[in-house]
Amino acid sequence: MPAVKKHTRGPATHRLSLSVAMALAACVAMPATAQEAGEEESESATTLAGLVVTAQKREEVLQDVPISITALPEQLLQDTGVRDVKDLQVLVPGLTVTSTQSEAQTTARIRGIGTVGDNPGLESSVGVVIDGVYRPRNGVGFGDLGEIERIEVLKGPQGTVFGKNTSAGVINVITRRPDYNTYVDGELTVGNYGALGVAGTFNSALGDNSAMRVYAAKRKRDGWMDVHTGNGPRREDEDYDQNFHSLRGQLLLEPTDTLDINFIADFTSREENCCTAVTLVRGGTAPLVDALAPDEGVSPVADPEARQAWGNRGTEQDIKDKGLSMELNWETPWLGGATLTSITAQRDWDAINGLDYDYSTADIIYRNADEDESLIAFDTFTQELRLTGSTDSFDWMVGGFYSDEDLKRNDSYRMGAAYEPYVSTLVFQRVAAGITAAGLPIDMSNPATFFSQVTGQPYGTGFAGLGALDRYEQDAKSYALFTNNTWHATDALDLTLGLRYTREDKELDSRYSNPNGSPGCAAALANPAGGVAQALLARGVPLGALTPAQQAALLGQLAPQVVGFMCLPWANALQAGRATHQEREEKEWSGTLKAAYRWNDQVMTYASAARGYKAGGFNFDRVQSADGQSSSGAGIIPVDDTSFPGEFVDSYELGAKTTWMEGNLLLNATLFHQTYEDFQLNSFLGTSFVVRSIPEVVSKGVDTELLWDTPLEGLMLQAGLTYADTRYGDETPTADFVFPGSLYKLPGSRASFAPLWSGSASVTYEWDFGGSLMGRFNLGGKYMSDFNTGSDLDAEKAQEAYAVFNARLGIGSRDRRWMVELWGQNIFDEYYTQVAFDAPLQAPGSPAPGDPLNSYNGFPGAPATYGVTLRVHY
């Protein structure tokens, strides 16, 4: 986040003080690509104790800030291969970042708290801020972040200063700004899977009071997932490829000693294929899928580590991200030289994504990668103003924030030729089991025709084509006033009070259509019991042998099940032609109170209490239930009110920041206890995503961080360990939380994506050799204990403990003119599942563990990748 600061001019390099301090402190923390050889260095701290961060939107020494922070400088990020927020997790204990059916749906979690993706109406618990601009969803911040100067990961609620939707933490990204030197940086990368990347920077002064910087990158890579495509129409036999380009331009104006203005314009385009899934458990429905496919349909044996997927429909994704921003800092003549900061931004983000919903080569259900049928688009304007000042005893800040976000979603479901025979067979098996249990005979032949017998329509005509085509348009406005103030009560004691008042206004218009007319469902609804009776008689069931009461009881049991499957959301005739308008307004206070005491130059302790808030919203999906209420059980009645309330957190921390070895060793620890109310859990119900409000979630534990510039010259260590016990409360607010409800495993259990232990470590060693050469080696790793990757905590979605390691070895000139680096990501090719889920339409059994009828899929993490990078600077 841009902070209050004064600027230098002329040939001296312009950079924030954290990167300068880290460069001189660690010797390996920041490359000198922004300096000409022989330039005079800026004066700065020479030990780690001088590290500066902007976690409270002013420059402060890391060891004086009463917040749990992981501060990561450019060189460490580069050595570990961090290009986006997903790569970042290898360096931050307690941080988990996952993706699902599209890389656009990327979700960050801190201390086990985050927001499951796949619903654009659900906002993030972990905020992403890039160059002072809030990004509306984590996925919007996914991509090549370019020249990163540093990243600060702030743990715990940060809503007072950073604003909306930061109830779990903030990922604060600061990219490099223009300076007054003229130089060119270049990078060429080649790697396995056909990886090829080029990137370059041109920086130059435009005069005594202005400078510019342009960064451009192009990266391509073949996919690492092998895809069996059956008879298509998909022809791409690889998935998770890479093909994007980015362009970022900056113009810095410093017309006076007290005013600077920085303009940023950026554009990124990604045209890739993502994301297929592997089979984790092959259940009883798999033979049905196989029988309808030209090949084996799904994996013959569950072998996720083979990284093979089955899909006959495309997963093309087309993501465009562009924006303009202006940051102004003016040291005013008011209030002792208070600084006025203004950050104005306009951003547009569009994502189109094709999807094979059934994850098989049987042509069951899919979505085309077409803007009219698949679109998520954000058009966001934000404005932040703040005035910051200080006296000998008081640091103060007041400000305001405004956001106007237009969100549009086009969503669709297409039913292929295999849809009717597959679902018909699946349902008939259930019906036949009920008939035989009643001691009656039934003709078991041709189960695929059962639906046509119920409706009386020709086989293959009741369920085909474009079943659902829906439009969602949301306008969301956010207004906030905030203040954050620190009173230096004594030379040792600081007291901080922060308050924020937020108003959220949201309006959602939803329009639902069934272009194919839903003939199968419509016919079933016209006479449910009669249609089922007609089908049973056609199959030789002697209904006449039953009394009228027995017939009514039997049909009363079977008809709702049959109609329920014939009227799934995308085929439900009751959804056709619906239009709903929803509004919600929220006015909430959040804030923080902190006390920090510096016992001596080596030890500072602090205590803090914070109230965090994340806005409520609406489900962007077809939601239906037994009675039209979103909290009720399964059914076919459309739900008009798809809203869910805001999320709140009360957080308490006790921390210590200690400095050792004359400022060269930092060891920090924080005890935390966080209680969330109305936690927003996004659950996949097998046919749609619905947000459930969990009455209580408690996360408690300890964060530790270590930075050590060791006595061995050139050797630097960075490490962290997090213990987080994050659990759902014991409450059972709806029937879903009681067996056999889909969420019955939640009460009292450890939350999904919440490992008890996670640790990260990075060791970097830099040395000189020969007359003018240097070498640098980095090894970084992340460990996570076991956790569950499903929102419903099904046992089949458990992920065992695992560790991922990255390594990089570089050799180059001491003047940083060139360097060649050999690198590897996930060097031991560790397999792990990012997110596991019920295979759509293939898990009709009970939610009890081990039900043999259920199949499960998963989105795997990336395998080992390696390559070589050449960097040049002139």
Image (cartoon, rainbow, N blue to C red):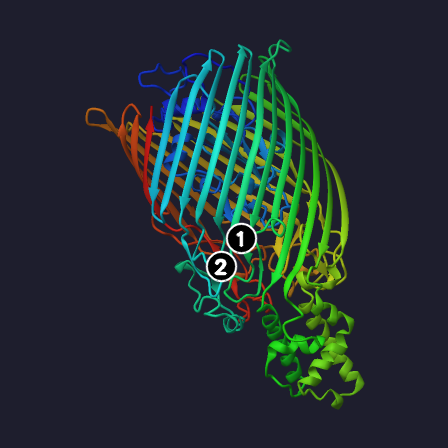
Residue underneath mark 2: 234
Mark 1 packing: few (<14 Cα in 10 Å), some, or many (20+)?
A: many
Instruction: Give the quarter of the figure containing the N terminus.
Output: top right
In the image, residue 239 lies at what x, y percent? 45, 53
Please tell me which residue lies in front, 233 or 352: 233
Q: Residue furthest bottom?
A: 545
Residue underneath mark 1: 101
Amino acid on which the number 2 mark rests in the picture: Arg
Residue 558 lies in quadrant: bottom right
State whether residue 200 is above or below residue 675: above
Sequence order check: which comes first, mark 1 or mark 2? Answer: 1
What is the secondary structure assignment of the residue under circle 2?
loop
* Res. 187 in view: yes
In the image, residue 267 lies at what x, y percent? 52, 34
Q: Residue at x 69, y 80 (%)?
A: 535
Q: Are marks 1 and 2 in contact (CB under 8 Å)?
A: no
